[in-house]
Each structure stands twice: as structure tokens, then as C-alpha cells.
Amino acid sequence: MGKTHRGSNLRDENPNAGRGTCPITKKSGVKLLYEHEIDGKKVKISKSAKATLANAKRRQARKEKKQEAAAQ
């Protein structure tokens, strides 16, 4: 994790040192580090939520690729 996501940088930029409840995973007390657009609103999400969204997107792309291959 880079220095922009820990320590004094978070304390200066965000209330509660960037900690709160993640809107995706619903975990409380986690660092909300990454901005993500959900339903047209920019929200801060946790590192694990970012990975969850990326994995879901990758799975969806792989599924579509398999469907295209099966159609041909």
C-alpha cells in the first residue's frame, strides 16, 4: 500500500483518518481509500471492496468471452 493511503496523509484529508463503513462490503471501521462511482454518485470504498468489484468485472468479461466462443 502506498504512502498516500496511510498515516498523516489520511488524517489531513479525511475525518476519522479515512475510516468508516464501506458501502459495498458493509464492514465498519475500515479505511475508505478509493473513490468509485455507484449509481452516479462518487463514494469512497475499501481496498477489499475495490478488489471485489474488479474480480466481478473480470468474471463477467470471461463469461461473455466464453459465450462468444460457444456461439461461433
Image (spheres, rainbow, N blue to C red):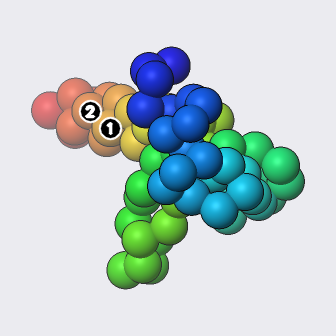
Which quarter shows the C terminus?
Answer: top left
Residue 52 lies in quadrant? top right
Relative placement, left or right, of 62 versus 29 is left
The answer to whether any part of residue 59 appears in the image is: no
Which residue is found at the position 57% from the left and 58% from the top?
Answer: 14
Residue in the foreground of this view, choosing between 67 and 14? 14
Residue under label 2, please give it.
65
User: Which residue is drawn at the image coordinates 72% and 57% (left, top)?
Assistant: 16
Instruction: Say if mark 2 contacts mark 1, CB within 8 Å.
Output: yes
Q: Amino acid at mark 2?
A: Lys
- Asked if 26 appears above or below 56 in the picture, the reply is below
Q: Residue at (37%, 80%) from the top-left corner?
A: 40
- Left or right of residue 58, residue 44 in this image: right
Which of the two discs, 2 and 1, sits closer to the camera? 1
Residue that mark 1 sits on: 61
Q: Position of residue 42 (x, y in %)?
A: 41, 71
